Image (cartoon, rainbow, N blue to C red):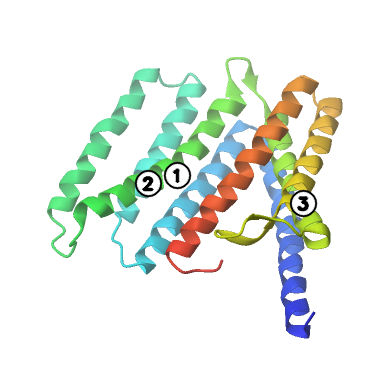
């Protein structure tokens, strides 16, 4: 292994550790403090992520409505939170329909856009791909029985466990490529290492948390490992389509 490659791998691992040491305590604090801080931190992440998604699309000479799409995604998140908190009735969800329809009218006045319908699709994709999943987190954590921070913490722990297990198993044991055309570094050994780590974390969650049964935690771990891996592949496909690495 060349010195440069070793340095790159060290840098990647260092970034993961630094991000975990700074980000994990802050996110866990916001989740545990109350449902308002939980909602605000994930709303902020949703806004930043969606706007970054649109910015990356612009690198490929696309012209999505970044500000408007991010606004619609943020409003969807806000509505979901207040509806789940029973502050607003469900009918308020219908507000999003005229706002999305207005997206077509905005494009009528964009003379510099040579592919308006393609860019309308990219605008809606940012809402569906980024904003909707973040909004649905509110549905999962805030229920008629109240706020369930344990479930959110368990989800994050399983995700981090899966990511770490896949990383170390792939580095030490990885030989058989999982989907080489899209992500050359991903291996079946890494996938099963992540799955095993996620299942172990799920069992530990069932021991310390009482919101879900053992079976529910284990099923969630399996679903998250499979869909998380597929999600990583979709992200790699997106990055390849616009020729970016990170």
Q: Position of residue 92 (x, y in %)?
A: 34, 24
Q: Disc 2 to disc 3, how far (Cα)?
A: 32 Å
Whether residue 210 can be seen here: no
Please give left or right for residue 9 compared with residue 203 in the image. left
Q: Secondary structure at mark 3?
A: helix
**Where residue 234 appears, x then y in whole percent?**
52, 51
Between the C-alphas of marks 1 and 2, the distance is 6 Å
Circle 3 crowding by C-alpha within 10 Å: few under 14, some 14–19, many from 20: many
Q: In this figure, which residue is indicated by the disc labeled 3?
A: 189
Q: Given contact means CB atoms under 8 Å apart, are the residues at marks 1 and 2 in contact? A: yes
Q: CA distance from mark 3 to mark 1?
A: 28 Å
Q: Which residue is mark 1?
A: 129
Percent x, y of residue 236: 54, 58
Would residue 109 be seen by someone viewing this image from the given angle? yes
Mark 3 vs 1: CB contact within 8 A: no
Q: Earlier in the sequence, mark 2 or mark 3?
A: 2
**For this view, does 163 lie left or right of residue 112?**
right
Count of numbered badges drawn on the protein: 3
Pointer 2 residue: 125
Q: How many C-alpha atoms fall within 10 Å of the one at disc 2: few (<14), some, or many (≥20)?
A: some
């Amino acid at each position: 292994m060349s010195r440069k490659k070793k340095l790159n791998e060290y840098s990647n691992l260092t970034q993961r550790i630094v991000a975990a040491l700074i980000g994990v305590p802050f996110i866990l604090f916001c989740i545990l403090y109350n449902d308002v801080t939980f909602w605000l931190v994930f709303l902020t992440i949703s806004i930043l992520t969606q706007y970054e998604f649109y910015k990356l699309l612009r690198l490929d000479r696309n012209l999505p409505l970044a500000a408007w799409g991010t606004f619609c995604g943020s409003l969807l998140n806000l509505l979901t939170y207040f509806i789940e908190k029973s502050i607003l009735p469900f009918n308020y969800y219908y507000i999003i329909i005229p706002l999305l329809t207005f997206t077509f009218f905005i494009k009528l006045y964009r003379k510099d856009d040579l592919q308006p319908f393609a860019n309308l699709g990219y605008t809606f994709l940012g809402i569906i791909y980024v904003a909707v999943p973040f909004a649905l987190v509110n549905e999962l954590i805030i229920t008629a029985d109240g706020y369930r921070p344990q479930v959110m913490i368990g989800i994050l722990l399983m995700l981090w466990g899966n990511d770490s297990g896949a990383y170390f198993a792939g580095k030490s044991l990885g030989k058989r490529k999982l989907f080489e055309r899209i992500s050359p570094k991903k291996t079946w050994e890494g996938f099963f290492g992540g799955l095993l780590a996620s299942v172990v974390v799920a069992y530990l969650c069932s021991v310390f948390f009482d919101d879900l049964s053992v079976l529910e935690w284990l099923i969630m771990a399996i679903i998250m490992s499979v869909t998380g891996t597929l999600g990583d592949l979709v992200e790699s496909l997106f990055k390849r389509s616009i020729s970016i690495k990170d």
